Image (spheres, coloured by chain):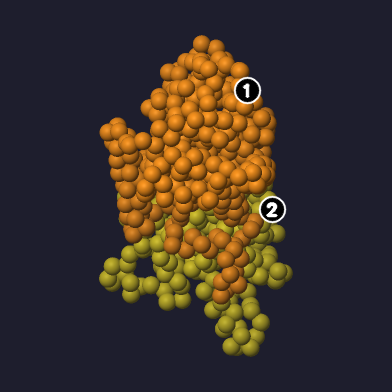
Amino acid sequence: MVIDLNRCTGCSGCVTACYAENNVPVVGPEMVAMGREMSWLRVERYYEEHPAEPVQFLPMLCQHCDAAPCEPVCPVFAAYHTDEGLNGQVYNRCIGTRYCANNCPWKVRRFNWFEPDWPEPLNWQLNPDVTARSRGVMEKCTFCVQRIRGGERQAKIDQRPLRDGDIVPACAQACASRAIVFGDLMDPNSEVSRLIESNRRYQVLGELNTRPAVIYLKRVVRDGEA
Amino acid sequence: MSMATPLTYQQIDEEVIRTLAPVTGRYRIALGISAFLAAMMFLAWLLQVMYGMGLTGLNVPVSWGCYIVDFVFWVGIGHAGTLISAFLYLFRVPWRTAVYRVAETMTVFAVMTAGLFPLIHLGRAWVFYWTMPIPNRAHLYPNFKSPLVWDVLAISTYLTISSLFWYLGLLPDLAAVRDNSHGVKRRFYRYLALGWHNRWEQWRHYTRAYLGFACLAAPLVLSVHTVVSFDFSMSVVPGWHSTIFPPFFVIGAIHSGLAMVLLLVIPGHRLLKLQKLIGMRHFEGLAQLLLFTTTFMAYSYGMELFMAWYTGDIFERSQFLYRMTGHYAWAFWGMILFNGVVPFALASRRIRTSQRWLLVISLLILIGMWLERFVIVVPSLAHDFLPNAWGIYKPQPIELVITVGSFGFFFTLFLACIRLLPAMAMSEMKEEDVHHRLEAAR
């Protein structure tokens, strides 16, 4: 996934789309104040004394690291690595030790502290393609694995190879400025492969060498101008 | 406190078996309070299993809190018991005998108490057994790369070996109690004594087995808390990912455990009127060990701070600055004071030989060691890599109830055992007398 920070406006449309697509529970203001919000994707804000950029923001989600620190520490293999390079979370295997959350440097993993609650008519809005999690299990961004499987399934039905653009995660779909792009880095013709050629590219906490799959493109601002 | 003329075998038996006499009012109150606290703990845990971990103050990023602190604390306390019973046995330290039974009993119950906490802190405690390599239909093993699975193996090994070692050492004493009892009590101790009749072959097997267990248990003193420290040092979290953790944790464990032994033995020997058998010689031995562990603790605190600066890593430096000046600075400085500064008073002979001062210092050490575990777990999680992810953890009442309740659980078991089982190793004391018959205790 490539996220171009030049395009990101911090509108949080991606966050909302993720909530809707992935049955992410809403926990209420008290719990959010305690630090228990369930957002799989968050827009990080940093405030700085800078004439052109007093606020900087960055969408932060599971980096799906190739050498994910959350995977070796799970005692029951609930956090594991798929063949396609996704960092998977198996909800019904998770026993809730929360070690994976501790070991994630980006702190993108979320825990269900209470049983999630969807009072009528919110339960009608749930996405049937996505498991609704119970209390006591960890969850996090899956790169919309249901859409990945859906795209693969459709390509199989149509008897054609998977094309770039067949799979669009909810956040990429909702982004009004097309800041988020998802694709196959192994495909040299995909848009992500083209985008990572940029010299603005970097990985958040890349120096930890966990090989994140999310590449950010640095925001470039002309100095001194508002 | 000096011990007068050495006691005969019969006198040693009488002194110790006398402590199993009918209970006093004070004992009943103590047992009652402990049992009440333990019951509150189980009730709180039930509420938590019914409603969810949200009843605690945990959040993201601080998803480990009081329960993990309590777990490490209790496992640590257990280590001093094994040090005294196994390690000091192998090194033939003379003053070990009188306190070894209390210490080993403390270990067994401390490890049992500690073993509750990995269950208490689980989000789905009812499937805890998935961490164990039990055959199942899905052909799934637990993840042996995970330090938590190593914990399961280490703690269960520790509990098994400690319990068996403890029970083995008890056999000759249980037989002595059996021989001195009548009626129902005699039958009870007859079952427990497993047919011990002071026969030569039994003693031969006993001494071999005892040595075997001591050899098995002694490495556990070093390995078990090392494995617990791996929960932290094998992660990437700044403030956890540190190579000093294994020895730091092991020595810290012995530090807290020795303090707990002193806290149990000093009031205990007065209440049980065992002054003829336990004296300042034993307390001073423990205090000298405490002085040694204090120097190592002070070194560890200093070295961690030095390395955080020396490494130049911004995350590491930021973490340690946060520990010293951030939201939990009170815990950090309390830890430094109670563990690394105050116990140096034990260098003074006057303080080391004063029962009152030993009690005060032991209590402060226990508080300091709990604070140390807290400082290791909470600020590291609250203040790690990304500033946007930083958070605060405020423990909630349910965690307090369970933490205090764990002390109730421990003391319920311990007090019950003090009245049911001989509080001192009578057979070993007789052995010691033979070797040091004319030596007067100082």
- Where B333 falls versus A24 (above or below)? above
Give the amino acid at mark 2: Asn
Q: Chain of mark 2?
A: A
x, y percent for residue B420 = 41, 42
Q: Is residue A19 left or right of residue B200?
A: left
Name the residue at 46% across, 49% down.
Answer: B190
- Give the camera-side residue of B328 and B294: B294
- Asked whether residue A133 appears in the rendered view, the answer is yes
Q: Quadrant of residue A193?
A: bottom right
Give the amino acid at mark 1: His
Which mark, residue B436? Answer: 1
Q: Is residue B116 left or right of residue B31?
A: right
x, y percent for residue A225 = 53, 42
**Chain letter, colour orange in render:** B
Quick one: label 1, few (<14), some, or many (20+) residues within 10 Å?
Answer: few
Identify the image quadrant of the C terminus of chain B. Answer: top right
Which mark, residue A199? Answer: 2
Mark 1 in CB contact with mark 2 (< 8 angstroms): no
- Asked whether residue B316 appears in the rendered view, the answer is no
- Give the camera-side residue of A188 and B254: B254
Q: Quadrant of residue A87?
A: bottom right
x, y percent for residue A107 = 52, 51
Name the residue at 37% across, 58% down.
Answer: B49
Name the residue at 64% across, 58% down.
Answer: B144
Chain A is which colour?
yellow
Name the residue at 35% across, 51% down.
Answer: B42
